[in-house]
Image (cartoon, rainbow, N blue to C red):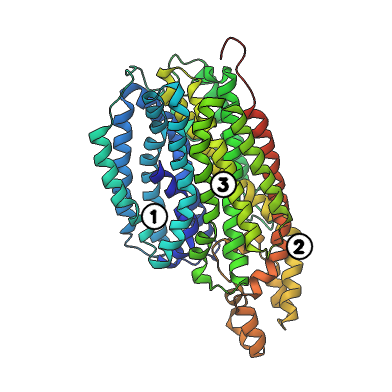
Amino acid sequence: MLLATINSSIVLISLPAIFNGVKLDPLQAGNVSYLLWMLMGYMLVTAVLVVTLGRLGDMFGRVKIYNFGFAVFTVCSIILSLDPFTGGHGALWLIGWRVVQAIGGAMIMANSVAIITDAFPATQRGMALGINMVAALAGSFLGLVLGGVLADWDWRSVFWVNVPIGILGTIWAYKSLHDLSPRRPGRIDWWGNLTFGVGLTALLAAITYGIQPYGGHTMGWTNPLIVAGLIGGVAVLVLFVVIESRTAEPMFPLALFRNHVFASGNAAGLLMSVARGGLQFMLIIWLQGIWLPLHGYDYSQTPLWAGIYLVPLTFGFLVAGPMAGRLSDRFGHRAFSAAGLLLMAATFGGMLLLPTDFSYPAFALLIFLNGMGSGLFAAPNVSSVMSSVPAHQRGAASGMRSTFQNSGMVLSIGLFFSLMVIGLASSLPATLFSGLTAQGVPASAAHAVAALPPVGVLFAAFLGYNPIQQLLGPHVLHALPAHNAATLTGRQFFPHLIAGPFHDGLVVVFWLAIVMALIGALASLVRAPRGAE
């Protein structure tokens, strides 16, 4: 689980080094698609496949599927590190093999929770799942730190790090893991798999692509292809629900949602996943694109230092995760899950009060408490969901839970980037124009830069990249006094310029995260009906 989830976030913070390594210009319009697929390809595939692979685990043996996933994952890590191409071809190599690697990651994700649930009695299950969830969510946080450290050395090392762990884990899993639950023969629900995969892929891809500009608009929500993806995706998912309700052996046992604990626990998990995914993106942009350059860090060093400065987030999770698992076995799951989300909501509120150029101790305390909130929520939530389903459906239930978690991460890309673009669009053009003309840039050139879609500026900040030199070009810069040209291309001008508009976007983003965390906390308090506990 640690390995599978490290891979979701390690690429997130290493993208500047990866783009430089394959010699891809992040500001060229066509390259935004490569960036989006590097971000979401892995998460999208795992979201689509975990339910099916959990169901296959119920049918053919969870350990067998799990072990094969470990092997696929490791082989793909080696292939990814050997990317022989540059430019678009190099990016497509990485995207393609990340998709294959995600199949292995989905096999691990779908079955690891079910294997642990089988192996431990109810009185120890919370602690056991707590350790597993610490590995899972700590992986998403540790990936940020590891990615920053390794990308500073060599971008290929981002993929090498998986190889020794993968080889050891594959051998260890084959030698030590054994299926403890009887296999349940059945048929594969082909129509269910097809409609679920097509519908979810169309919907999530459309939401993610919606942040790209189209036809003079700052975003692409009026693009006929995006609209078709949204409407078509929802229509196919409705068809999927109809098919599943009439299939004797469905891949997605809808009857499980009649269980109040299962339904509310998954709803809370989805909301938490969206909020946590949005937080990761915003913190990386905030640190790499604004705060670190303002404090004198070179853009090439920002991934490393962003990872280091995010250590309190990981530490907070590691402190609370195991403790919450153990205590929830004794005192119940609902209070811990709800308290974790309430603590997260409070920290989002605290971040609203921070200035863009914040004092680090206050920031570190807030992200530490946010990590603690995630830790308090994770294990009790998973334990309550998995303990509420019959043993023979735990593979499918684990896959369904992982689908909500991974879909939440993909949703957070489209949702939070869209909200950030909305926030930027209201103030960024005027800020760019006034900032550039104050340094002597001709009004026509300043207007051309200010009219660029905010998503380009957002991705430049996300990649820790100063675009001013490229956007103005040598002709404009050489015509300016040397002092003004040096200011414009220095490490502080661009982050200082976008700090105000970025904070406008942060306000929108964090308010949504607060609302999601509060609704998730209410969902976590739902108890089973009398007689069903």
Label pair 2/1, CB-CB below 8 angstroms: no
In the depicted structure, whether residue 484 falls above or below residue 119: below
Question: Disc 1 and disc 3: Cα gap in Å?
Answer: 30 Å
Residue with the mark numbered 1: 94
Label pair 1/3, CB-CB below 8 angstroms: no
Q: Answer with mark 1 or mark 3, whichever residue precedes in sequence.
A: 1
In the depicted structure, whether residue 388 falls above or below residue 144: above
Residue 506: percent from the left, percent from the top? 69, 54
Q: Which residue lies at the image location 43% right of the left edge and 34% below the top edge?
A: 49
Drawn side of residue 446 relative to residue 36, left or right: right
Say which amino acid is labelled 1: Leu
Q: Answer with mark 2 or mark 1, whichever residue precedes in sequence.
A: 1
Say which amino acid is labelled 3: Gly
Q: Which residue lies at the image location 62% right of the left edge and 14% below the top edge?
A: 529
Q: Which residue lies at the image location 29% right of the left edge and 36% below the top edge?
A: 68
Residue 90: percent from the left, percent from the top? 38, 60
Task: Give SS at disc 2.
Answer: helix
Say which amino acid is labelled 2: Ser
Task: Give SS at disc 3.
Answer: helix
Task: Give SS at disc 1.
Answer: helix
Quadrant containing the N terminus in the rendered view: top left
Q: Can residue 192 be seen here? A: no
Give the label on residue 371, or none: 3
